[in-house]
Image (spheres, rainbow, N blue to C red):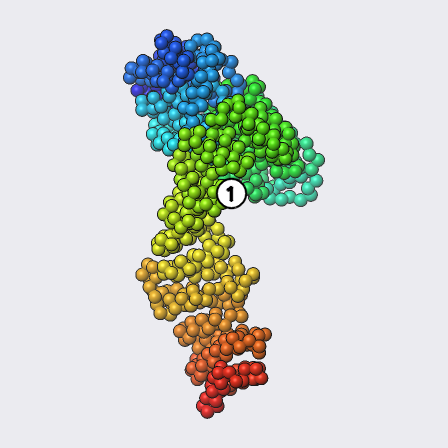
Amino acid sequence: MSAALRSAENALILNQELDEAISAQLPTHITETVQDILGGQYTKVLREHSPIANNSNEQQQKELQGSGDIDTYIDQLLKSVDNDNSDNDFMLLATGIACLNAFVQTNWTGPLLDWSVSQLLVGVEDQQLDKKIHTHCLNSLSADSEQVYHLTQRLGLLSMARRILLHVRPKLATAPFWAMRAIFIQQQLLDEHAGSLQELLLSLAQECKFDNEKGEKQLKVRLELELGLIYSYYGQDKEAFEKMQQAQQTSEFQWSLSGALGRRTKHQTFDVTQLVVLAESSNKDQQQQQQKEEQEGEDQLKPETVELQDDTLLDHIAFTKTEQNDQEKDKRHGNLRIIDQCLLLAFCLNVKNTNPEHGLTSTEMTPYVTRVLENANNWMVHTMGLLLKTRLEANKSRTVERSALQLQALVDQIKVEDSGVEERMTYFYDLLLPSKWDMERELAKRFISLGVVRSALDMFERLEMWEEVVACYQMLEQPTKAKEVLERLMQEQGDQVPKLWCIMGDVEQNPDHWRKAWEVSNHRSARAMRSLGAHLYRQKDYDGCIDCYQKALAINPLFEGSWYVLGCAGMQAEQWEVSLRAFQRVVALDNEQAEAWNNLSSIYVHLDRKPDAFLALKQATKLKFDNWRMWQNLLIVAADVGQFADAIWAMQRIVELRWDKVRDECVDTLVLQMLVDSVMQNWKDASDRDGVRLQRQVQRLLEEVILNRITNSPEIWRICAKFYLWQKRYTDALEASVKGYRAVMHDTRLETDQEVFERVANVALDTVDMYETLGEQEQDNAPVCADWKYQARLILKGLMGKVRDVFEETETYERLQERLDDLKRA
């Protein structure tokens, strides 16, 4: 393929005009086709320039009109025009792009098209043919039992684009990229994520090869950004962030979160540090392009922006006049290249995905949106920025009204021709913009949050989103009407629609309805099995639950929640291999699922794979740093497998988290004794390292972590005394032993409960033995306790005096008397 033709391919991805020198090297029909696509003239491309336009014979058209099988029809046309000619391949690529963009224009960006698929294929409008093609595409574009939204318009265009782009995929460098875009659009039509489409998307992405050294840096930026959005869509936030970072580095775009003094309210009398994004586009060889984008942005109309009507809150932060603010003004407000604005919006989405839904997330996301809306140079980028802004403002009392009005304006603008098709499409694939029906669904849900359920119900009925319709009737406490809606739909559509049976099952909580859905779907409705599995789990029928979820996940494996419930059911049924596979899949789908890591460790313990259990718990505690139960599990497993350093750290975390609530229970003295013994006896750890190396850590655990908080445990003092004795800190060892005795001698049950008396007596005798052992030992050129006999007798006399009237006749009391007599004789 010629370099000029490759430049034409690149121009279609980047939406950039061909320069005159390259145009002169290309045939006229190719340069015209490129200009038409860049200008949004998709109809002209499909009718006048496409190799398959008017290329079908009468027999092929009759077969299409009879069956509506547009896939077979396109395959036949592709065979007839396939001649291994690079110009012809390029024109096929252009045809696929025109079909895809026309489909997106119809269902995402607007303005609406004024022709049908039948007009394109057979030259005249044929409503029966359009209906047959639509029905065929509803089935052919479904994947993994997930259905296409049935009111999607001109599905035939997507089916054509998909067929053509996959056909030319091995022949042209950018064809896999366009095919990836088409498959991702297909995914967004489905009810849920489809595993087969995800695999295809990642496979197509790997086929895309762009090289900075060949002047394809901007192509690489787009590929990395769009792949990041795909990962984000599927909830793979870590991979998404990595791809976005790669795109940022390739683009040489610099940004950071920072603080700037300013005020948010009209009556504020003091300055507060506000979170802002400081950003600059690369200035290498790109100033001219940036200036061009700025000029175009100023000349073009912008989406309607609803002003904030509030007597307190400022619409924009009023930044304080300071030297730092003045220095950072350009980074805070200066213009950015459009692709860099798309990157900022992508990073904003990643913030939302990787953080729980609370106020801090909203605070973190707002600066990204604000920075883009400062000077959005593209209609679609501006639209996406406003959409994110409406979501951020939806839960704030002072902005909730503006949020709903702005979202309504964004829904309405699809029908308005206030900007050209070309501008709306230029950066569409670099933004995760919802389809027009998803935008309307979001608006209806916004109405529900405001309590306007009836208006939301009307919208859902118009969109024929029957699940939401049923939910609204249930909110209105009209379950009978919800059932009537479903019965009417079954009469109209027949009782062989699995989705309707599933919704009926949800309404009536009748497992027979989900079984019926499974049957009428010819055992292909993953949703029916998910719902039935969840029901059986609640009924504690774990074997039945496992069977249902295994069937559902064999059809569509991209349901993290389903894998999680399957894992739990496997644990309940003690089917350890089933639960092991399930939780391994959960953490593969979401590496930050702490509970799944914790459950995985329990399974490893049952399977006697304790080293694996230890690694799983390390990950769990990393993700849930304040969950003491996970630290408790890690403590036991780490001690068991000889990971003593981790056991010390786990015990420290447990004490820090629990000591003020359950002081007497937060230290596992058996494990503490093991940790001390590992140092004193120099046990080898799991990595064959000497235990004595942890002497300092154990000492810190005892003195700074435990004894700083817990002083009423004789067992802890006993362990501490033993450790000090090993360190030859005789004075400290004796003192620890005495403190252990004092911790128990004040027990109020001492004079009434014989078991308590015996426990205290044993501690007292141990302390007396410690006096006898250490009293005459030399430390710092002096005996540890010169009057040790007196102190030892004092302990015994004090205890015996307290309990003489109650326990004088007991064996334990006699032991105390004998020990006292021994001391006197000594």
Question: Toward which corner of the image does residue 96 lie, by quadrant?
Answer: top left
Residue type, label 1: Asn
Above or below, 292 relative to 559: above
Residue shown at 68% from the left, 42% from the top: 268
Number of numbered discs present? 1
Q: Residue at x 48, y 58 (%)?
A: 653
Residue 246: % across, % down: 41, 36
- Residue 163: x percent and y percent? 37, 21
Of residue 94 and residue 822, the one placed in the foreground of this image is 822
- Furthest residue toward left: 84
Q: Considering the image in quadrants, where does the C terminus appear?
A: bottom left
Q: Quadrant of residue 772?
A: bottom left
Is residue 436 shown to the viewer in this render?
no
Q: Can residue 712 be seen in the rendering of this structure? A: yes
The one nearer the camera, 256 or 505, is: 505
Asked whether 395 or 199 is in front, the reply is: 199
Q: Is residue 213 above or below residue 821?
A: above
Residue 155 rendering spot, x and y as whole percentages:
45, 20
- Mark 1 Cα shell of 10 Å, populated few (<14), some (14-19), many (≥20): few
> What secondary structure is marked by label 1?
loop
Relative depth, front residue between 698 and 192:
192
Position of 17 relative to 595 (above/below): above
Vertical position of residue 420 compared to residue 267: above or below: above
Q: Quadrant of the N terminus?
A: top left
Residue 196 falls left or right of residue 297: left
Residue pushed farthest front? 512
Please give the name of the residue rendered at 49% of the width and 81% of the height, measured from the top-left corner: 812
Q: Which residue is mark 1?
A: 355
Q: Position of residue 78 (x, y in %)?
A: 34, 16
Q: What residue is rendered at 50% in x and 77% in y?
A: 758
